[in-house]
Structures are given as structure tokens and as C-alpha cells.
Amino acid sequence: MHHQLLHAAVLTPNGQWFIQHRPDSSVRVLDGATAMVELAAEIQHRIRTTRNDTR
């Protein structure tokens, strides 16, 4: 995915998300949509913080 902040995200049938930051990192389990939205907000924050540093 963009900026190498997330390698994979897979939704399981029970509503959990399996995510992996890098191909060689361990899999993290997020419990539902709220946790996924929180992760997305965290990633957006990192992108914006990094972008401001390079300007």
C-alpha cells in the first residue's frame, strides 16, 4: 500500500481484520470496523505529519 505503512489487510468472515505492516512482520488482529477506522486515522496522521516535515 502507499507509503509502506501497511502491507496487507484482510477482512475475516467474523468481522475481524488481519493486518500486516511489512511482508516479514507478524500479523495483527483488529477487532471490527472501529479498530480498522482507528488504524486508518493513525496512518493518515503519519502521512500528514511526514508530508509537513518535507515541505
Image (cartoon, rainbow, N blue to C red):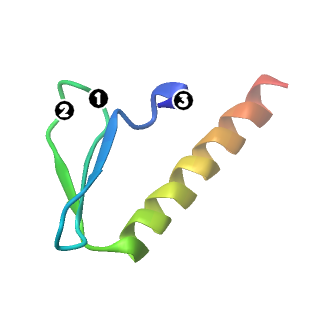
How far separated are the C-alphas under marks 1 and 2? 5 Å
The quadrant of the image that shows the C terminus is top right
- Give the answer, above or below, for where 54 lies relative to 43: above
Displayed quadrant of residue 12: bottom left
The reply to whether the C-beta atoms of the residues labelled 1 and 2 are less than 8 Å apart is: yes
Tag 3, which secondary structure? helix
Which mark is in front, 1 or 3? 3
Which of the marked residues, 3 or 2, is nearer the chain's N terminus?
Answer: 3
In the rendered structure, which amino acid carries the disc numbered 1?
Arg
- Give the answer, above or below, for where 46 lies relative to 37: above
Q: Which residue in the structure is indicated by mark 2?
A: 25
In the rendered structure, which amino acid carries the disc numbered 2?
Ser
The residue at 54%/27% (across/down) is 3
Tag 2, which secondary structure? loop
Mark number displayed over residue 2? 3
- Mark 2 is surrounded, within 10 Å at the Cα level, by few (under 14), some (14 to 19) or many (20 or more) other residues, namely few
- Mark 1 is surrounded, within 10 Å at the Cα level, by few (under 14), some (14 to 19) or many (20 or more) other residues, namely some
Q: Which residue in the structure is indicated by mark 1?
A: 22
Q: Is residue 17 left or right of residue 44?
A: left
- Give the answer, above or below, for where 51 lies relative to 45: above
- Mark 3 is surrounded, within 10 Å at the Cα level, by few (under 14), some (14 to 19) or many (20 or more) other residues, namely few
